[in-house]
């Protein structure tokens, strides 16, 4: 509903209240003049907090792909609003599906250890989410239709959060948001631009747990993030 329509509806409602008051109170009807423009302006534009809460509700009740039929919980994401870094992974695993929180399993604990040496934490300056909000069965890679159904939620999160940097963890996140087909090995060591936001690609922590040789490249990626953001390096992950 447009702003002018909202004003008209609110004025009609006010008139009805005035009429009801005159009937109930047996007093003459008096038309009350009120300026509804500020209220209509707020309703038309929408406060950022309202948009964020509305997005949470939309994700929680989403049924746009088949993953809704096997999930226990949707996993909206976790962290601070307007973070320095937004981390985007692939999708929830079993522990995430059970808890409704992202990256809480072994891979999530590993991710936290990556971030800490450059002063980043989901408690203070990071938001963590995934490309899909529901767990794919057996932790398989999300299918194209599942990604297509969920990607508008991710894009809206980025728009509302406005992070200073995006960290895409793994090929699924990189391919979905950057629309590139190269593997992580070719995409890392570059800084991409996602709608004006510097974007870095690195390996997914689950992949690094399976392939320890990726640990050094990931540490180089963390140091580059610190350089981009002007963060001190507090230690080694």
Image (cartoon, helix red, strand yellow):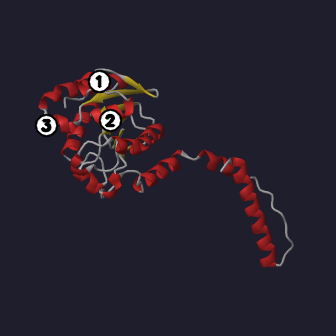
Q: Residue 127: which quarter of the image?
A: top left
Using residue 18 as the reference point, say whether residue 223 is left or right of it.
left
Residue at point 41%, 25% (across, down): 193
Whole-angstrom CA distance, mark 2 to mark 3, is 19 Å
Q: Which residue is mark 1?
A: 187
Local secondary structure at mark 3:
helix
Q: Position of residue 51 (x, y in %)?
A: 51, 48
| Residue 12 seen | yes
Image quarter hosting the C terminus: top left
Closest to the observer: 70 or 101? 70
Q: CA distance from mark 1 to mark 3?
A: 20 Å
N-term mark: 1 or 3: 1
Residue at point 26%, 45% (across, down): 103
Q: Position of residue 55 (x, y in %)?
A: 46, 49
Bin the neighbour count of mark 2 within 10 Å (Cα to Cα): few under 14, some 14-19, many 20 and up. many
Of the numbered discs in the image, which one, if any, rests on residue 173?
A: 2
At horizontal 75% and vertical 68% (from top left) the residue drawn is: 17
Q: Which residue is mark 3?
A: 210
Can residue 36 be seen at all in this image of the molecule?
no
């Amino acid at each position: 509903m447009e702003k002018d329509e909202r004003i008209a509806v609110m004025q009609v409602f006010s008139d009805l209240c005035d009429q009801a008051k005159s009937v109930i109170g047996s007093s003459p009807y008096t038309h009350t003049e009120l300026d509804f423009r500020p209220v209509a302006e707020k309703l038309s534009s929408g406060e950022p907090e309202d948009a964020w809460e509305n997005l949470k509700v939309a994700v929680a009740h989403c049924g746009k792909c088949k993953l809704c039929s096997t999930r226990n919980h949707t996993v909206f994401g976790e962290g601070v609003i307007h973070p320095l870094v937004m981390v985007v992974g692939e999708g929830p695993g079993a522990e995430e599906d059970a808890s409704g929180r992202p990256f809480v399993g072994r891979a999530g604990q590993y991710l936290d250890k990556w971030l800490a040496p450059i002063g980043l934490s989901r408690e203070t300056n990071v938001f963590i989410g995934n490309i899909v909000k529901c767990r794919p069965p057996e932790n398989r890679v999300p299918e194209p239709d599942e990604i297509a159904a969920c990607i508008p939620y991710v894009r809206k999160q980025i728009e509302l959060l406005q992070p200073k940097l995006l960290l895409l963890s793994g090929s699924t996140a990189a391919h979905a948001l950057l629309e590139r087909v190269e593997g992580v090995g070719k995409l890392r060591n570059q800084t991409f631009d996602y709608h004006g936001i510097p974007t870095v690609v690195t390996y997914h922590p689950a992949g690094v747990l399976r392939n320890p040789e990726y640990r050094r490249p990931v540490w180089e990626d963390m140091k580059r993030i610190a350089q981009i953001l002007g963060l001190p390096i507090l230690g080694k992950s």
